[in-house]
Amino acid sequence: MHTGHAALAPPSPDGFSEHAPAGRPVSHRTNNAANAAWNR
């Protein structure tokens, strides 16, 4: 569930989530799922 901040920046392909604050690593699985949803 995103907080709306995702609209401020595009998904990162380096394994960081657009849902998390910059520099905060998250699982690639979660990030890939989010990217797939946003890039649809």
Image (cartoon, rainbow, N blue to C red):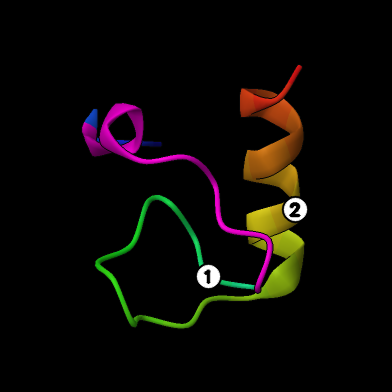
- Residue nearest the observer in this picture, 12 or 3: 12
Q: Quadrant of the N terminus?
A: top left
The x and y percentages for residue 19 are 37, 51
Q: Disc 1 marks which amino acid?
A: Phe
Q: Which residues are magenta?
A: 5-14
Q: Disc 2 marks which amino acid?
A: Asn
Tell me which corner region of the image, top left, top right, bottom left or bottom right, holds residue 37.
top right
The numbered disc on residue 36 is: none
Tell me which corner region of the image, top left, top right, bottom left or bottom right, holds residue 14.
bottom right
- Residue nearest the observer in this picture, 14 or 20: 14
The numbered disc on residue 32 is: 2
- Please tell me whether residue 21 is drawn above or below residue 34 in the rendered image: below
Residue at position x 43%, y 51% from top?
18
Q: Main secondary structure of the magenta part?
A: loop
Q: Quadrant of the C terminus?
A: top right
Label 1 residue SS = loop
- Please tell me whether residue 37 is drawn above or below residue 20 in the rendered image: above
- Please tell me whether residue 26 is drawn above or below residue 30 in the rendered image: below
Give the Cα separation between the discs numbered 2 and 1: 9 Å
Residue at position x 23%, y 37% from top?
5
Q: Is residue 8 magenta?
A: yes
Side of 4 where 13 appears, left or right? right
Label 2 residue SS = helix
The numbered disc on residue 16 is: 1
